[in-house]
Amino acid sequence: MKRGTIFVLSGPAGSGKSTVREKLMQKGLNFHYSVSDTTRKPRGAEQDGVDYRFITKAEFEDGIARGDYYEYAQYTGEYYGTPVSQLIPYIEKGVNVILEIDVAGAMQVRERDKNAVLVMLLPPSYAALEQRLRDRGTESEEKILKRLARARDELNFFDKYDYFLLNDDGRIDECVRRLEMIAEVESDKTRNNPDFPNKFFNIQGETKK
Ligand code: 5GP
């Protein structure tokens, strides 16, 4: 059976990742959104088990020791990680999984699964990013500055990604459309359909040599 594909969506805080991912999920395609564990506190209307599973540092470190995480990273002093249970069972059932994770996590995913597709979402400029973070008004000045510094580092990974999407103002739906197209094209890749020749010859009533 065809395996699902891992789609990693990264981008600086304020790039619009969550909105793009939510809109993609609303389309009812063959996608599971991997809910990460984090040690940071809930922000705004975030719900436990829906946006993240909010856990303590001790719980997270126990999870690391047990090998519960497919990848994990520290971001502005907090742990974030993808539980294996959010990923592998879906991929094995042929469901695509979307991971909204940072660049450090994305590099670990690439290392573990060469077929993973890495997409970076970017605001039109650094200035626009700063403006969005401030407009959000959910974080302290200290956290905003940390996130901006992190955004600079993340851009260094640009060429490690397969695709990038530019989220200019008012362009959210276009980003979702393009992400959907990327998923379609990826599913037609020969390397993602290794069993096709066998099926093909069976349809013809022949056996592949
Ligand atoms: P935020 O606190 O804004 O929700 O997330 C901070 C950063 O952590 C974002 O870049 C987000 O994509 C990333 N992140 C969220 N979940 C995970 C995860 O499971 N693993 C990794 N490596 N990064 C994550």
Image: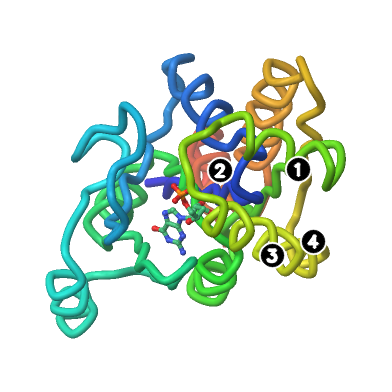
* Mark 3 residue element: helix
Spatial separation of the CA atoms under disc 4 and disc 2: 41 Å
Residue hosting label 4? 158
Residue at position x 27%, y 61% from top? Answer: 39
| Type of the residue with mark 3 | Ala
Residue hosting label 2? 201
Q: Earlier in the sequence, mark 4 or mark 2?
A: 4
Q: Nearer the viewer, mark 4 or mark 1?
A: 1
Instruction: Look at the picture and state if 29 lies above or below 18.
Output: above
| Type of the residue with mark 4 | Phe
Neighbour tally class for label 2: few under 14, some 14-19, many 20 plus, Cα within 10 Å: few
* Mark 1 residue element: strand
Give the colouring mode of the picture.
rainbow
Spatial separation of the CA atoms under disc 3 and disc 2: 55 Å
Image spot of residue 132 (x, y percent): 68, 33
Q: Is mark 1 within 8 Å of ligand 1?
A: no
Residue at position x 65%, y 49% from top? Answer: 11
* Mark 4 residue element: helix
Neighbour tally class for label 1: few under 14, some 14-19, many 20 plus, Cα within 10 Å: many
Residue hosting label 3? 149
> Is label 4 in contact with label 2 (beta carbons under 8 Å)?
no
